Amino acid sequence: MMADLPAPAKISAKDAFHDVADVHPFHLPHIFNDCPEGPDAKCVLNSTSLTMPVVKAGDLWPSALSSRPLSAFELRSKLKSKEAYWSKAGVAGAGGSLDQNMSLCADINRAALQWAVEHAETGVAKRFATKGEPLVIVDDKKATIGATGPEWIKDELVFSRVADSTSPTGTRVEVQSWMFVVGNANDGNVPWFLPAGMHYCNSVAVVSCFTCSLLVRCLCCCYCRHAFLQHCCNWC
């Protein structure tokens, strides 16, 4: 989704799963080839990304709980930038402005949430629609550079509970990702160990909620805080 390459160009991507602060074995996403003839049917970019699962309870649990179960709070993702993909694929219009769109990470999160809802058990999805607390993805915000480097390395998804008269619970939870962009120096033609052409996002961890909904149905919101929030505890 980050690349948004025109058809029929494609991407073959592999993901490394480790701490985003680690530099070994490698801590940056990369594109290993280009498409000299442009984004045609023969264009398949070989790319890597990096994802760090952040496991914690979070702050949205009901205060009455004596303990807050751990779950995947977010997936912190280092991706190649849209500019980098377009440049390597030979798409006209590649430039830094492509990554100044403040909805690129949000669009990924909306798609992930929609996937979870569409693959949930029918009964769970129906009950959530009538009694659950909506999760609403909002636009990204830019992470800054601090004294020790990019603040994004430690920045987390922001979950904010706000009033919503249209919600079954009277509230909704808005979730906002931080974005951090590294310019695509020399069109990405730099040594592999140098940072260039990257777009960092905080991604919602909805897969854990999907799995949970299959196993424990109406208790899913007590143990999964993203796609089906706490109010499903009141369904039983």
Image: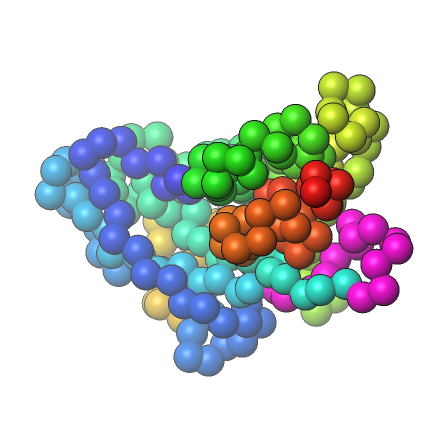
Instruction: Locate residue 215, reporting x and y percent.
Output: 52, 55
Q: Residue furthest bottom?
A: 24
Q: Which residues are magenta?
A: 54-67
Decide: is 137 above or below 45.
Answer: above
Let me know if residue 203 appears in the view. Answer: no
Instruction: Locate residue 51, reporting x and y percent.
Output: 48, 62
Q: Nearer the viewer, residue 94 or 3?
A: 3
Q: Quadrant of residue 37?
A: top left
Q: Is residue 204 left or right of residue 165?
A: left
Q: Nearer the viewer, residue 223 or 136?
A: 223
Instruction: Locate residue 45, reporting x and y percent.
Output: 24, 50
Decide: is 99 above or below 190.
Answer: above
The C terminus sits in image quarter: top right
Q: Nearer the viewer, residue 73 or 27?
A: 73
| Residue 59 covered by magenta stretch | yes
Q: How many marks?
A: 0
Main SS type for the magenta part?
loop
Query: Which residue shows up at 40% across the image and 40% down it?
Result: 1
Instruction: Locate residue 105, reporting x and y percent.
Output: 54, 42
Query: Which residue shows up at 53% across the image and 35% down it?
Result: 123
Query: Which residue shows up at 63% across the image and 39% down it?
Result: 140
Query: Which residue shows up at 79% across the image and 53% down it?
Result: 61
